[in-house]
């Protein structure tokens, strides 16, 4: 009987990780070719962020942030997301996404973009290499 209780408890803990926002983890995002790739993330100042952002909102804005970063690439098919960090500043959710993409000479560049949201509404993007 104890084995069953332990199994059920561990199952519930694993299940909750799919419905609750986590401080660190990985998520599947599309690269430039439309393939799903695993991308690691970290939420900075997690206690503050989780007061304003839930898992469903997170699941909505992260793929949008990746898509907006891909749109800034000169050759979007070469877009390859690597990792991202999420934090809040004055009520604005900011996702700093790190990725690589090729330039006009075919040389891959390491780039990062700051994608800003008000709630779940896109505001702006700033890109730096």
Image (cartoon, rainbow, N blue to C red):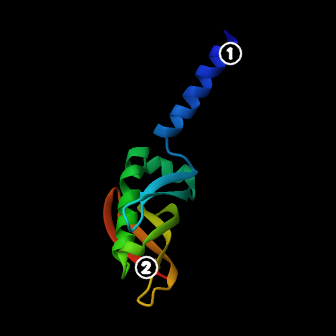
Look at the image and tell me whether residue 29 can be seen.
Answer: yes
**Residue 38 or residue 41, whichever sits in front:** 38
Quadrant assignment, res 102:
bottom left
- Give the number of the disc on residue 18: none
Counting from the top left corner in percent of width and height, residue 19 is at 46, 38
**Gap between marks 2 and 1, in whole Å?**
52 Å
Residue sitting at x 55%, y 57%: 40
* Among the two numbered marks 2 and 1 on one chain, the one whose residue lies closer to the N terminus: 1
The residue that disc 2 covers is: 127
**Residue 43 or residue 45, whichever sits in front:** 43
Number of numbered discs: 2
Q: Is residue 27 above or below residue 14?
A: below
Packing grade of label 2 (10 A; few <14, some 14-19, many >=20) is: some
Packing grade of label 1 (10 A; few <14, some 14-19, many >=20) is: few
Look at the image and tell me whether residue 90 can be seen.
Answer: no
* Figure quadrant of the N terminus: top right
Counting from the top left corner in percent of width and height, residue 54 is at 43, 45
Residue sitting at x 43%, y 50%: 52
User: In front: mark 2 or mark 1?
Assistant: 1
**Callout 1: helix, strand or loop?**
helix
Q: Is residue 38 above or below residue 122?
A: above
Counting from the top left corner in percent of width and height, residue 28 is at 46, 53
The residue that disc 1 covers is: 3
What residue occupies the far top of the structure in this picture? Answer: 1
Residue sitting at x 69%, y 12%: 2
What residue occupies the far right of the structure in this picture? Answer: 2
Counting from the top left corner in percent of width and height, residue 43 is at 54, 56
What residue occupies the far bottom of the structure in this picture? Answer: 105
**Callout 2: helix, strand or loop?**
strand
**Residue 91 or residue 56, whichever sits in front:** 56
């Amino acid at each position: 009987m104890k084995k069953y209780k332990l199994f059920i408890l561990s199952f519930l803990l694993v299940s909750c990780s799919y419905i609750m926002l986590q401080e660190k983890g990985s998520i599947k995002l599309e690269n430039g070719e439309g393939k799903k790739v695993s991308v690691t993330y970290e939420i900075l100042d997690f206690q503050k962020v989780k007061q304003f952002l839930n898992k469903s909102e997170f699941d909505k804005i992260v793929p949008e942030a990746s898509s907006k970063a891909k749109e800034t690439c000169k050759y979007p098919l070469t877009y390859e997301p690597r990792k991202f960090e999420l934090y809040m500043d004055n009520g604005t959710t900011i996702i700093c996404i790190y990725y690589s993409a090729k330039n006009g000479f075919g040389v891959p560049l390491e780039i990062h973009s700051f994608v800003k949201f008000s709630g779940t509404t896109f505001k702006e993007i700033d890109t730096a290499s």
